[in-house]
Amino acid sequence: MRLELLALAAFAAGAFSAAAAHENQSESDVQIKSTQVAGSVYVLEGQGGNIGACVGEDGILIVDDQFAALSEKIRAALKALNPGPLQFILNTHHHGDHVGGNPVFGKEGTIIAHENVRTRVSTPQQRGDRTTEPLERSGWPVVTFEDNVHVHFNGEDIRFIHLPAGHTDGDAIVFFPKANVVHMGDLLFTGRFPFIDTDGGGTVEGYMKNLAWVMFNMPATAQFIPGHGSLATMDDVKAMHEMIRETSAYVKKLMAENKNLGDIKKAGIPPEFKSFEWEFISGDKWLETLYTAYSK
């Protein structure tokens, strides 16, 4: 948990490089854990965003790649699943704990992402008073798309689908229909308040609408790989959607009563949603996110 929090803090501060993410820790402490989700699809947990992997006779496809400093460990974990070549890297969005390994793995396979992801990883990004430099050119997506793209690989007709600005403006989910698995990127933090990157184009309303889209368009029986947290089900997606809808209505009501942010924090998060609190985003932080979103 501590390593994951440090990684999250790094991308929230705009530190989209492996060096910044590891400034106060050693990658030697990180272990990569591989778990079969269904069929040819696995999840790799280490530090940062969960990696999806599709392995089979065509080789290896991964969804996100954590940090460059972990690339050898990630490569070893993938080779233990399948000795074939890495063919494709799909980026769910541009944050460093999901694309930090791009400069390494982009020399081995083809990086695919929404066009906004290429724009953000290839240009300086500003968050507050911090500027994040672009990734090395080998880490830029080679294939970009506007709405969706299909990748036919290892017997899967993989659907890579862009959704409107939610967590960022480049969010895309990955659906493996044969395995019945969806990689959500950071459009799902299992049982936790999500991070909305407004500097990266994210919006609270968009995040909520994207969850609703998933609820109506993905199979109810699917398994979900979240950006952070444990494997999830549609019930977890619905719970996240309900939490955002209810807490948004709560904050809007208090704002209509001329309550300021201090008043709203004093009132606190509704008790039924306190279980979503965690070290990175407390109830106060989530209330502030909502207040800021609806003050515009």
Image: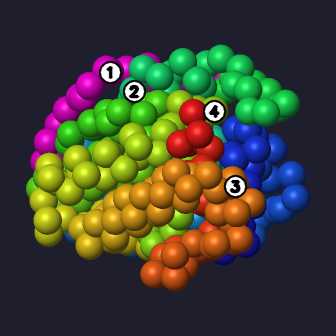
The residue identified by callout 2 is: 114
Q: Work out whether residue 229 can be spotted.
A: no
Q: Identify which residue, 267 or 168, lies in the foreground.
A: 267
The percent position of residue 273, horizontal first and vertical second, equals 48, 76
Residue 51 located left or right of residue 197 = left
Per the rendering, the mark at residue 95 is none
**CA gap, disc 1 to disc 4?**
22 Å
The residue identified by callout 4 is: 199
Q: Nearer the viewer, mark 4 or mark 2?
A: 4
Is 215 drawn above or below residue 273 in the view shown? above
The percent position of residue 37, horizontal first and vertical second, equals 29, 69
Q: Decide: marks 1, 2 in contact (CB < 8 A)?
A: yes
- The stretch in magenta equals 136-157
Q: Decide: marks 1, 4 in contact (CB < 8 A)?
A: no
The residue identified by callout 1 is: 145
Q: Nearer the viewer, mark 3 or mark 1?
A: 3
The mark that comes first in sequence, 4 or 2, is: 2
Q: What amino acid does circle 3 point to?
A: Leu
Q: Decide: marks 4, 3 in contact (CB < 8 A)?
A: no
The percent position of residue 192, horizontal first and vertical second, equals 51, 69
Q: Identify which residue, 171 or 151, lies in the foreground.
A: 171
Residue 166 located left or right of residue 296 = left
- Graded by Cα atoms within 10 Å as few (under 14), some (14 to 19) or many (20 or more), the crowding at tag 1 reads some
Q: What amino acid does circle 1 point to?
A: Phe
**CA gap, disc 4 to disc 2?**
17 Å
The residue identified by callout 3 is: 261
